[in-house]
Image (spheres, rainbow, N blue to C red):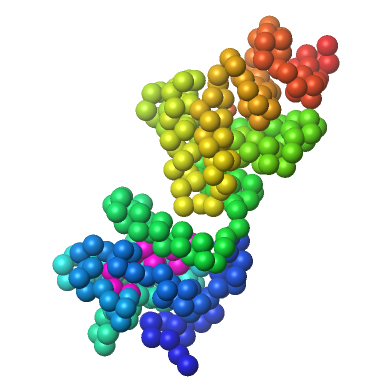
């Protein structure tokens, strides 16, 4: 038996994310969404038309972007009377439109339409919230893996838009943080928190350079806390780890009252990298060694690298 949505039989599209690991096809996602689409997930202006018999009405953009999360590819939009775009997915050669049934017998033209971007669509807060609800329900019902450290690293690298200096910096800080964390015997959850904190710790640098002309302490910490929350929005990350990572980003330049091994090690790892990148003086390094370095591994590394082991 076939499906009613456009493109259900167009080729072989499979889940590309490593988050759900269900090997989903568009038809299977459609089946899952049939139970989740509701009046609330429908665009407010179309709610009057929504019914269980017409479930796909007003669901197109949030559904297409959710399908993009799972299958990759691009989202395109057909201009409709009234100026709104009806969104659908294109993955490789396959065009599919999970919410086409709302148009009944009308034949839509899926050729030559403009690409649609989530930043534009989700600038509308109510739409972003409906998308998150839809995604959240899918996760709740079908489970989803937690975001991996390498997944976070990949997202951060791609989000850095080719700034090699920024990328190299956090890769080095992450490496030192992981090394110190493992040598100091952190448990798996502490290590995960530390590694994630190290990857995103300087997330506000590009913004601060543009907004303030520098990447100095306090502002970078403050802006960073907001940006980290935005970075993980819609992602599956343990709530307590997210809160701690936000805290770490918001304090990684604050050397007073360092509480917790993750915080301590992040400060040490960041300094180990900064000392080299910024060609810090021996005096500066010795000062930091006595003032802020606490872990045995961190001290050994700092002395070994910059002070000739003295
Ligand atoms: Fe840093």
Residue 58 within the magenta-colored segment of the rendering = yes
| Ligand 1: quadrant of the figure | top right
| Whole-percent x, y for residue 227 in the image | 45, 37
Classify residue 102 as left or right of residue 307.
left
Question: At x 28% / y 76%, what residue is drawn?
Answer: 51
Give the residue furthest to the bottom: 1
Which one is nearer the viewer's eye here, 22 or 7? 22
Res. 43 image quadrant: bottom left
147 up-or-down from 205: above or below = below
Vertical placement of residue 134 versus 285, above or below: below
Please indicate, yes or no, whether residue 220 appears anywhere in the rendered image: yes
Q: Residue furthest left?
A: 82
Q: At 56% across and 35% down in the image, what residue appears?
A: 244
Residue at 52 percent of width and 34 percent of height: 246
Q: Is residue 294 above or below residue 206?
A: above
* The image quarter in which residue 2 lies: bottom left
Q: Which residues are magenta?
A: 56-69
Q: Position of residue 193 (x, y in %)?
A: 63, 38
Residue 145 locus on image (x, y percent): 60, 58
Query: What secondary structure prevails in the magenta region?
Result: helix
Residue extending farthest to the right is 309
x and y, in percent, of residue 157 in the image? 56, 44
């Amino acid at each position: 038996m076939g499906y009613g949505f456009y493109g259900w039989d167009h080729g072989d599209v499979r889940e590309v994310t490593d988050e759900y690991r269900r090997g989903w096809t568009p038809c299977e996602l459609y089946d899952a969404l049939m139970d989740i689409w509701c009046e609330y997930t429908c665009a407010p202006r179309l709610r009057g038309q929504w019914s269980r018999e017409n479930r796909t009405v007003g669901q197109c953009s949030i559904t297409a972007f959710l399908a993009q999360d799972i299958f990759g590819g691009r989202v395109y939009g057909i201009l409709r009377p009234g100026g709104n775009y009806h969104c659908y997915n294109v993955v490789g050669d396959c065009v599919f439109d999970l919410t086409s049934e709302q148009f009944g017998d009308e034949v839509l033209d899926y050729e030559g339409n403009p690409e649609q971007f989530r930043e534009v669509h989700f600038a509308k807060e109510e739409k972003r919230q409906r998308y998150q609800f839809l995604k959240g329900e899918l996760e709740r019902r079908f489970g989803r893996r937690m975001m991996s450290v390498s997944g976070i690293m990949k997202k951060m690298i791609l989000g850095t838009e080719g700034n090699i200096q920024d990328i190299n910096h956090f890769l080095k800080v992450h490496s030192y943080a992981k090394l110190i964390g493992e040598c100091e015997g952190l448990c798996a959850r502490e290590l995960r928190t530390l590694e994630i904190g190290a990857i995103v710790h300087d997330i506000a640098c590009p913004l601060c350079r543009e907004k303030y002309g520098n990447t100095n302490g306090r502002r970078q910490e403050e802006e960073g806390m907001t940006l980290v929350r935005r970075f993980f929005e819609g992602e599956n990350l343990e709530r307590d780890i997210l809160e701690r990572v936000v805290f770490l980003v918001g304090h990684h330049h604050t050397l007073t009252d360092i509480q917790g091994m993750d915080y301590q090690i992040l400060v040490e790892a960041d300094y180990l990298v900064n000392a080299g990148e910024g060609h810090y003086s021996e005096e500066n390094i010795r000062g930091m060694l006595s003032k802020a370095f606490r872990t045995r591994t961190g001290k050994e590394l700092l002395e070994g690298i910059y002070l000739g082991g003295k």
